[in-house]
Structures are given as structure tokens and as C-alpha cells.
Amino acid sequence: MKKVLITEFMNQNSVSALKKKFKINYDKNLWKDEKKISNIISEYNGLIVRNKTQVNKILLDKGKNLKFIGRLGVGLDNINLNICKKLKIHVQPATGMNADAVAEYVIGSSLHLIKNISLLHNGTIKGLWPRTSFTSRELKGKIFGLLGFGTIGKKVCRLAQNFGAEVVSFDPYISPSVQKKFNIKLLKFNKLIKISDILSIHLPLNNETLNLINFKTFSLMKKKPIIINSSRGSIINESDLIKAYKKKLISGFALDVFKKEPVSKDFYKKIDSSINCIITPHIAGVTYESNIRVSDFIAKKLINFLKSRFSIYLF
């Protein structure tokens, strides 16, 4: 019987479905013990992870029987894809399965920040009754800028448009037909960040996007926008973000992803209740519903792959 190792949390119903087909070793905290994973990986044909398990060259070289890696999510930063391709290991992300969750996070954060909810809440519970201290705004009529227009970007677009926002995007890979279908304007990068009231990032992390949003970028922003990053932490220079806020180049920000996770204590020292921000621990795509979808999707892909007579490697 084929064997599958699951090192991070997965919906129990999906785990049970896998147990009917394979011998399963499921430990949602195993990702913390890299040495143990490395010592046992040679026994397994399939590996299921989220974003904490480091599937690096050392681990892959020891996985002599490994044929399938399922990623309970979308980003593949923690998986060495080049080595997987060389070793003919199929890597399967759960593309699109958590898109609704992330899109709702983006819109929820936009509303929270543009209406200064945190600042109003903090002032109210202190007994200040800050009814005239802050001005709330509406999404209706605002320019909602999307850096990247993939699956999540498209869902954010539809939600933002339902609130009456005008959606613009920077994405050189979008076709005119998609632009027409979603009724958006495609802009160059500098133009988009210059005119956006809300700027939401939906880009992969690569050499082109690393540190893409830095102090120089913030200095080009003319409308003191809300910044939302639910994509990859290293796309934004976090120190420059705080500096930009304090210099009033932006009016608020939501960060669900960070350069280093968990976030260091030094970062928290820069955040206090006077800052219009939302800080969350990489959970934008993690909801009760999305966990079911993601887990079910990967379970089915794994079953089909390992049970199939022919192995097909797609990259």
C-alpha cells in the first residue's frame, strides 16, 4: 500500500478519505521537526504540506520514493520546484480553492481601514468618544488598484465593483478580452500606484517583485492610499511601509504576510494603537470553508495521481 505523509493541518474528512486508499501518517505539527521529516521521508510516495514545511533539496534528495507533493494553498515558495522537476515529482497547488476567502479578506480590510474602524474603536473604549476626530470614507467611487489580476484579483474586482468602486489593474499578462469582460482599466505600474485610493497586492514573489513596494514607490503615491498585502511579504519593504505611514504618504495598511513568519518582536515595536492598520498571521485564505475545499481538492488529486496507471508530471 502506498504511503502518504501529511505535516500540517488538513480537514479531517479529507484525511479520512485518504486513509481508505493509502497508509497515512498525519501530524499537523510535524513541520516543526525538520530532522524527523528528513529521516522518514524515504518511506513515502506522497507528501502534503502547507507553507511551513520546507521542501528543500536536502529533503527531496532523501525522498527516493516521493512522486507527489500536494500544497494545501497556492504559494510554492517553500518547495524547491527545480529539484522536483529534476526528480520528476509532481507538485500540485490548490489553485483557486481559497480565492473567495482571500478576496473577502481584502474587501473587509478595505472597509475597515477606509472607515478608520480600529482608530475609532481604540478611542471609544478609552472613553474618548472620537466622533469628530476621524473622517470615514466610502468605497463607492474610489479607485481600487490591483497589482496582479489572477484568480484572486478577479474575485476582488467583482466584489469591489459591487461596492461601486472603479477597478484598475497592472498585469502585463491580461488579454483585452479579460479586460473587457471585467470592465477594468489596465494601467502601467507607476500610473496605477499614483491614482489608486486602495492598492491591493496579488503578485507572486520573484526577482521582479522582491521589494517592489519600497519608499520610492510610496513617494509616488498621490492619494495617500490604503495598502493591502495578502500575497507575499517580501514584496513590500516593511520598514519603508511604516516610514511611509508616519510621513503620511499612505493612510493605512493591512498585512497578512511578512518577510519573516512568525513576525519578529522588533516589528511589533513599530506598531501601536495610533496606527490605522490590520496585522494578521497569514490567515487571509484560511477559513472553515476554504480549508474544506483546499483539503478535498488535494486529496482527490493525490488519489487520482497515485492510483492512476500512468504518472503525468505537470509543471
Image (spheres, helix red, strand yellow):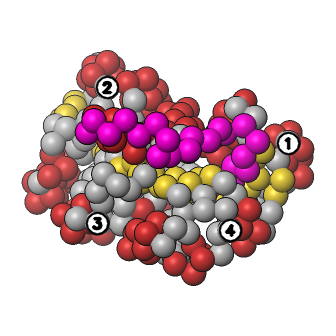
Question: Which residue is at the front of the view, 158 or 6?
Answer: 158
The C terminus - image quarter: bottom right
Name the residue that disc number 2 marks: 11
Mark 2 or 1, which is nearer the eye? 1
Q: Which amino acid does label 4 sit on?
A: Lys
Residue 41 visible in the displayed image: yes
- The alpha-carbon separation of the residues under discs 3 and 1 comes to 39 Å
Q: Going from the N terminus, do you reach mark 2 or mark 3 first?
A: 2
Which residue is pictured at 70% across the width and 32% down the height? Answer: 163
Residue at 21% across, 69% down: 266
Residue that label 3 marks: 270
Q: Which of marks 2 and 4 is nearer the N terminus?
A: 2
Q: What element carries label 4?
A: loop
SS type, badge 3: loop
Residue labelled with disc 1: 183
Say above or below: 19 vs 237: above
Real-space CA distance between mark 4 and mark 3, rounded to the nearest whole angstrom: 24 Å
Q: Which of marks 4 and 3 is nearer the N terminus?
A: 4
Q: How far apart are marks 2 and 1 (CA)?
A: 37 Å
Q: Is residue 144 magenta?
A: yes
Q: Which mark is residue 222?
A: 4
Q: Where is residue 67 in the image (x, y as percent from the top left)?
A: 38, 49
Give the mark toward the camera: 2 or 3: 3
**Foreground tag (2 vs 4):** 4
Q: Which disc, if any, is residue 247?
A: none
Stretch of the chain drawn in magenta:
126-145
**Image: 110 above or below 63:** above
